[in-house]
Image (cartoon, rainbow, N blue to C red):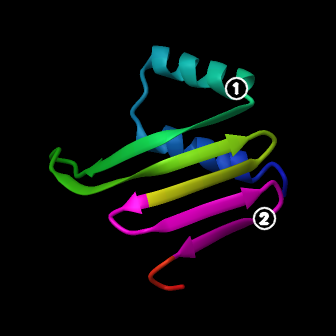
Amino acid sequence: MKKFCFPLLMSFFISTYALGAEGIELLENFSKNVKNAQGEFDQTVVDKGGKQIDQSSGKFVFSRPGKFLWQYTVPFPQEMICNGKTIWVWDKDLN
């Protein structure tokens, strides 16, 4: 179960962006060499015609192996937290 959390995060990155060969190489290098990071993100979802259908933003922090916090602030507060063994999803509106 320890290996579950980080691949979940990486699959999100891969499925969110259409990567060319250079992008894939950069992602592979990142996944091999970066041990921890934090930052902010903006995520836009578009339909097949390129029309924006969803927008969200927030913060993330991760530390290897397998620990992360993915925190949405817009459009509503929600957190995904992994301690390396278990993943929790918390939605403020649902408490």
Q: Give me the residue at 77% from left, 47% from top.
A: 66
Q: Give the spatial CA distance, label 1 vs label 2.
A: 22 Å
- Which quadrant of the figure has residue 80? bottom right
- Name the residue that disc number 2 marks: 86
Task: Give percent across and percent down for residue 91.
Answer: 51, 75
The vertical placement of 68 against 10, above or below, is below
Q: Earlier in the sequence, mark 1 or mark 2?
A: 1
The kind of residue on which mark 2 rests is: Thr
Q: Which residues lie in the magenta part?
A: 73-91
Q: Position of residue 51 (x, y in %)?
A: 15, 49
Q: Residue at x 80, y 48 (%)?
A: 3
Q: Assign the C terminus to one quadrant of the image.
A: bottom right
Residue identified by numbered label 1: 34
Residue sitting at 67 percent across and 69 percent down? 88
**x and y percent of residue 26 in the render?**
55, 18
Label 2 CA crowd tier, 10 Å (few <14, some 14–19, many 20+)? few
User: SS for tag 1?
Assistant: loop
Residue 33, quarter of the rendered image:
top right
- Up the image or down, 40 lies above or below 58; here it is above
Q: Which amino acid, by three-letter code, is at mark 1?
A: Val
Position of 73 compared to 60: left or right?
left
From this viewpoint, which residue is outermost toward the bottom? Answer: 94
